Image (cartoon, grey):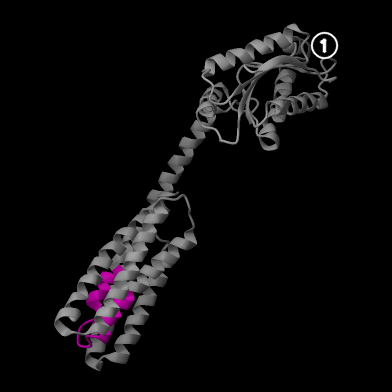
Amino acid sequence: MSNVFNNNLLSLRQANTIFAIFAGGFSLYPIFIEKNFLMAGVYLLTALIALLLAIYSNYKMQTSYENIRFIKILITVFYANIILFGIYLNILSNPDKLASIFYCFLISALLMFINPPFFNLCLTLGAIVLFIVSTVIVKKPDDSFLDVVNVLIAGAISLYFNWHITKLRLGLEISATMLEDERNKYFDQSTIDELTKLKNRRDFLQTFQRYLSNYRTSDDWLCIAICDIDFFKNYNDHYGHPMGDECLRAIGRVLDGLMESMGVYAARIGGEEFALLWFEKEASHVDKVVFHIISSIGALKIPHEKSRVSPFVSLSIGIYVERLGAPDDMQSLYDFADKALYTAKGSGRNCAIVCGGDIKEYKITPDV
């Protein structure tokens, strides 16, 4: 939720709470002294509206829902409620009283909100027109003339101050937004691998810990895979480092697409080494992800003349599958997956070794 939206909700809660108490207090005099239940009813109605707005604003502050049009509607309702109270108090029930006294209070309420200047202008001009029309219709010519003059002066002053205060507030909000964007930019730079645009080792460790702590009740298994490009040093020596970088980028694009297609998190954790994390409902579903990775890398058909296992770039993959909630710590799970990777390398490369605490080790190859 943005600062502007949250601040406006806070102001709505505070302003409506104050006004509910204020209007409720006004209803006591006509009830107990004047016995004017119509007047008391109007005051109680405005107090009830303000109380409901305060409660609703407080409820919205507890959610992440954000809608600019919605907050403008709430401010307009709040403003209309005050106008109803003011017109009845200063014009309809007390025709000899100057309406501009309450109008100054009405305008000052706008200073609590962070609105675009045009929206403030519409609210202010709307209030001016309503007060002037009500005054001219109900009051005597002498009283209405003073009211019109005072209301116009109060409106001009309020517009001037609202304009400048709004500019200052919006300027501060823009500065805060720019600082937040810069902070997010630097944070992204610290967690993204510059070459492949995948997440880096730092983000992988943080995500791994989060996956161990937070998971859906519908998931039963956590899968961690460590991938290594087969004979990548030979590839670099033969084709050159620029081609090696391009190879890493191509593989990075394939692994990055796994999140959208299969819900698999991918990160580059070393030179030619990548790590994957994902959840499964059934342990047997791991094969589907592994086959997809192997076939997607094979489909790239990146030539690798110096590979001893394939004419194209291939991967060796070690996968460890553990039941969620098991006592194994992050380092142990990583070590198990790393050990499975070395088993894949030792058994011919260009394959995947899947194992786990409750799973008997087995091998997956492109030919299977």
344 sits left or right of 116 in the view = right
The 10 Å Cα crowd at callout 1, few under 14, some 14 to 19, many 20 or more, is some
Of all residues, the one furthest to the front in this rendering is 358
Instruction: State which region is magenta.
Output: 83-107
Percent position of residue 276, x then y? 64, 24
Foreground residue, 46 or 333?
333
Q: Total of numbered circles in the picture? A: 1
Kind of residue sitting beneath label 1: Val
201 sits left or right of 149 in the view = right
Percent position of residue 101, x then y? 22, 76
- Residue drawn where x is 73% and y is 11% of the image: 344
- Give the SS element for disc 1: loop
Percent position of residue 102, x then y? 24, 75
- Give the residue pinned by disc 1: 309
Q: Quadrant of residue 308?
A: top right
Q: Give yes or no for residue 103 being in the magenta stretch.
A: yes
Percent position of residue 56, x then y? 39, 60
Residue 114 in view: no
